[in-house]
Amino acid sequence: MKKDIRTAVTAILGLTLMLGILYPLVITGIAQGVFPGNANGQLVYQHGKLVGSKEIGQQYTDLVYTSSGKVKLDDGEPVTTPDKRYFQTRPSGTVPADNAAATTFANYGPNDKVTEQAIASNAAAYLSLNRPYDPSLILAQVPVDAVDTSASGIDPDISPANAAIQAHRVAAIRHLPLPTVMALVHRFTGQRGLGFSGEPSVNVMELNIALDRARA
Amino acid sequence: MTAFGWITIFGFVALLTALALPLGRYMAAVYTGGHTWLDPVLGPVERLLYRCFGADPEQGQDWKAYAKSLLWFSLAGWVLLYIILRTQTFWDFTGLNPLHYHSAPWNVTFNTTSSFLTNTNWQYYGGETTMSYFSQMAGLTVQNFVSAAVGMVVVVALIRGIASRSGKSLGNFWRDLVRTCLYILLPLSILVALTLIFQGSIQNFTTYLFAHGLTSGGAQHIAMGPVASQEAIKELGTNGGGFFNVNSAHPFENPTGFTNILEMLAVLVIPAGLVFMFGRMVGAPRQGYAIYGAMMLMFLGAVIVCYIAEAHGSPAQHAAHINTALTHGADGGNLEGKEQRFGIAGSALFDVVTTVTSCGAVNSAIESFTGIGGAIPFANLSASETIFGGVGTGLYSMLLYVLLAVFLGGLMVGRTPEYLGKKIEAREIKLVAVGLLLTPLAALFSTALAVASQAGRASISAVGKGPQGFSETLYAYLSQANNNGSAFAGYTGFVQPSAGNLGSHGVTFADLLGGFTMLFARYGPILFTLGVAGLLAGKRVSPPGLGTMRTDNPTFVILLIGVIILVGALTFFPALLLGPIVQGLTGHLY
């Protein structure tokens, strides 16, 4: 029995050294050497400042100020309003929205009244944001990704249909021709993985950065 | 539904089979001491490890000695992991706790430790708000490897028992353990981790970054870490414990549609390969194909139902008058709690892959699946890991069911039941029956305790009203008893008001009940399985005669599926009616 215990203890310690220390270190070494961009999260810098990651969804919103300073919600998070110059990401279940340091599912049940209310209010917000620039837009045209919460809460992508609707608003606000904006949407539409896996997805961060450049 | 969705599903099945066949051949060589092309590299490391451990790899062990080594090793692993997790700040000197996170409370740590030891990876904690990089690497990643290896060596021992021509030896635990980690799990993990990084997974020790955002409201902190190395073994070992709270939905864990396929393949390739390995090791590949056929039929049934249900959309969406049909530029369906880059098919398929195995990694919120779509993971868990199942655990659960089916079939046609030349008698079938009932017993007993007590109901999420709350509870204990680890994630055992565990507290009832459920439902069946292996090992082989019932033809496959569905349905149907089925049938909002 004593031998069994000694073997068990040395085995778990030895395997911890090999699999828990050496293995991750070797992988990190190779990753930093061969794919440094990916291994560090495809970070985007502007004027020397880190603005985000291409892989991580973020809010394209502005803080709301009054004469007495930032307006805050009951939970202390600042009130924001969508920045109409930019394409908007999917609804997020994290607090605050698109929190990439504390991700969480929204966990809305399929048969819950709160789910219906959340979806209906997302749809209403989406319509009021986009209909002024596309009067023919109706509820039945609102794509599911624009009203359903993403899984990660930091989904970097939207559907091509969602982007095509928002393109009307973005083009009007930025005084760009719609085809110019749509050309950018097509440029940043990722196809299905391996040609079949998943759905076509528009990367919002890349698209928005390209828009800023198009203006300049 | 789209053509691409169906191509995803059937293309995945084809890829899986194509990869599992050669892997099965390779694993058979690893366990029977044959030569592999990795010998020149790994041979010296292997011998060094035996010397350090003071283990004699050539010494055969009967089932009791094998079980004893397994249990001591597990106990040592439990103690070490508990210590690492509870002393998280002590390891700050390594620089691998950049946010100086404190340890989680004792009750949550008890649950987490039991969870990773048993290959469950149920998580009451959120990775990026709780764990240091050191805990994730030296603690959780190690158990991801060795808990998977423990499951695999048990099925190898059972196969040796079935195949043995003489003697009582089931092999040597230490040799099987080391060879599993070194020759199978480690090389595959390196391969998968590097592919994930190539596609966009991260692998660094940087502290969490602050990004200013493009607009004033866009500022955010971004969690970092050595993700890919843990992600690879998380899938390959059917562990499923995410580096981040949202698991494989997180873009750093699962960045593209390609990695989504890769991760699903990584989850299933070893369980599927083991089936082919079994056929080779017993000298009758057709026996392996028959079991593979039974598993694949049930798997496809689950995927097809789940995909159709999710593509249809949810009652909540329809009540809000959302158009869930396929339109130009959007595939529609119930995208609540799903990621755009995976879509409906990629999420439904992942959901089935993760719940038929004991993986429990998720790339979408299972709680937000439709009633019928969400009933599929329930049904998969009710099948007790017989549809591929966890690495090792799946095949030994299935082989117990095979013995049960052989016994029932033998009784029906009036022959002495025998499997691969070994007579199945009263003693074996008693062990099989009890071994198979331990997991459902643990699941249902714990669920009943949890819904009937105030302390248990405290874990139900605020939005989980009516049947949703019952579903959450049932799923929690079904998942922990099956060592799966996926969750209706609203169910909680850990209240963490701020990151770093300051001011946080665990829900002791849920933490302890879950922890004990996992330990009981893991080691109980393992001991019974090794007991069956021991009994079979001592039996003489009789040559097949005219009266032998064949176990490698379609008739037997159908009998086997029937037995699994019958046992699962009789055990779980009443409970399933109260949760997911009532939601799927009514469309009523609560």
Image (spheres, rainbow, N blue to C red):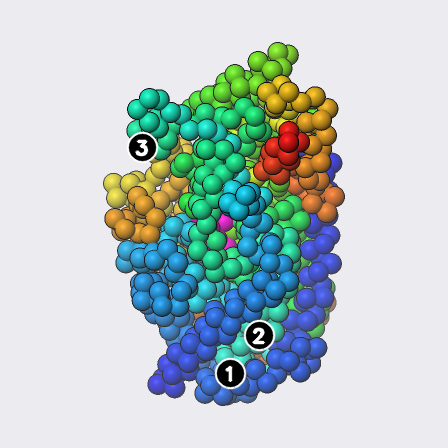
**B320 within the magenta span:** no
**B244 within the magenta span:** yes
**Side (left or right) of A169 relative to A115:** right
Residue B588, position as x, y percentages in the image: 46, 23
- Reading the image, the residue beneath label 2 is B182
Measuring 64% from the left and 80% from the top, which residue is drawn there?
B41
- Reading the image, the residue beneath label 1 is B49
Q: Which residues are magenta?
A: B240-247
Kind of residue at badge 3: Asp
Q: Which disc is residue B190 wearing?
A: none
Residue B467, position as x, y percentages in the image: 40, 33
Nearest the viewer among B421 and B70 is B70
| Secondary structure found at label 3 | loop
- Give the letter of the chain under mark 3: A
Quarter residue B94 falls in: bottom left
Counting other residues with Cα less than 10 Å from the Cα at mark 1, is it few (<14), some (14-19), or many (20 or more)? some
The reply to whether callout 1 and callout 2 are in contact (CB within 8 Å) is yes
- Reading the image, the residue beneath label 3 is A75
